[in-house]
Image (spheres, rainbow, N blue to C red):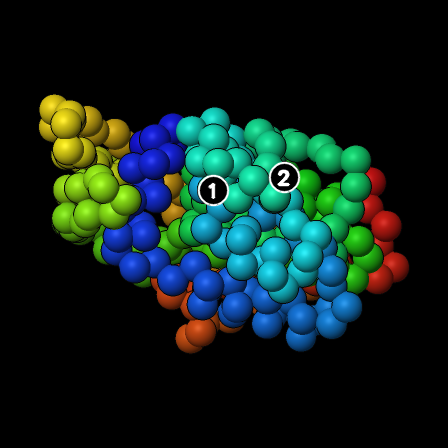
């Protein structure tokens, strides 16, 4: 699915995902901690739905994603915003930013606590002193709902997509497993069916906070403003230069 950027866009835009409102909440938390923030790196930027709104707020923005299919759509839809392929655990850019955002629970694609810690260290490496990292978590073990079935049918951009998902606790006990089936139809084309499986780590709140702290951040978990499972907001101390 992550390599099918057009289908991804059709599903979430058709379902009314409010990228503008979500970006505004993230920007507010960044500004409250770093009022002069002028640059932002979106890690796991996908097709660029948040990036285009961050660009209005910060001016200097850039995106990183591991899926070429997502990046292809981001480049086509937002040609003025640079995006590139990179792994959130290990990427290295030759610059720092005032803020790093990692949204839409992209962090759930990691495996194990070591990968979470290396990701937060990578974020810290790319932040200026006083910079802010905002991370949207996947569900915690205590609020994950196993055996959840979801479904939707949307039409967007001349494409109709039916999506049905079933999410259970993974056999390992520390992740969710979502099996998803898609039907995709466009005029003049045969109906396509494909399926995929998403395994998403169920890190606890304590594990997220420990990873932030180990990377040198002060961290706060905030709820009530952002859809889903809230946000972690970390601040890199002004006296921490990083690696």
Residue drawn at the location 54% of the way across and 51% of the way down:
51
Secondary element at image label 1: helix
| Mark 2, residue position | 82
Q: Residue at x 32, y 52 (%)?
A: 13
As drawn, 111 above or below 137: above
- The correct choice, above or below, for 191 with respect to 131 in the image is above
Q: CA distance from mark 1 to mark 2?
A: 11 Å
Q: Residue 9 at x, y = what percent?
A: 34, 44
* Camera-side residue of 103 and 149: 103
Q: Could you say which disc has been placed on residue 77 in the image? A: 1
Secondary structure at numbered mark 2: loop
Task: Say which quadrant the N terminus sits in.
Answer: top left
Report crowding for label 1: few under 14, some 14 to 19, many 20 or more residues within 10 A (C-alpha). some
Number of numbered callouts drawn: 2
* In the image: residue 86, left or right of residue 194: right
Q: Which mark is residue 191?
A: none
Nearest to viewer (mark 1 / mark 2): 1
Q: Position of 145 compared to 238: left or right?
A: left
User: In the rendered image of this protein, does residue 43 appear above or below residue 220?
Assistant: above
Looking at this rendering, what residue extends furthest in the left direction?
191
Residue 74 x, y percent position in the rendering? 49, 39
What residue sits 19% from the left and 27% below the top?
Answer: 194
């Amino acid at each position: 699915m992550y390599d099918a950027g057009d289908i991804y866009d059709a599903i979430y835009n058709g379902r009314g995902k409010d990228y503008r409102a979500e970006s505004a909440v993230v920007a507010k938390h960044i500004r409250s901690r770093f009022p002069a923030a002028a640059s932002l790196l979106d890690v796991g930027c996908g097709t660029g739905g948040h990036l285009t709104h961050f660009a209005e707020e910060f001016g200097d923005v850039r995106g990183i994603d591991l899926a070429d299919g997502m990046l292809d759509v981001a480049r086509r839809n937002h040609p003025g915003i640079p995006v590139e392929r990179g792994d959130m655990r290990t990427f290295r850019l030759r610059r720092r930013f005032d803020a790093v955002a990692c949204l839409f629970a992209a962090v759930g694609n990691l495996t194990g606590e070591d990968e979470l810690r290396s990701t937060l260290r990578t974020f810290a490496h790319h932040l200026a002193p006083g910079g802010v990292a905002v991370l949207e978590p996947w569900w915690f073990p205590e609020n994950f709902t196993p055996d959840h079935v979801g479904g939707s049918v949307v039409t967007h951009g001349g494409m109709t997509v039916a999506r049905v998902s079933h999410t259970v606790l993974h056999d390992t006990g520390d992740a969710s497993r979502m099996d998803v089936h898609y039907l995709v139809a466009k005029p003049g084309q045969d109906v396509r069916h494909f399926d995929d499986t998403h395994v998403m780590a169920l890190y606890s709140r304590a594990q997220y906070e420990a990873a932030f702290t180990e990377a040198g951040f002060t961290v706060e978990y905030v709820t009530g403003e952002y859809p889903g499972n809230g946000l972690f907001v970390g601040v890199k101390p002004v006296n921490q230069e990083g690696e």
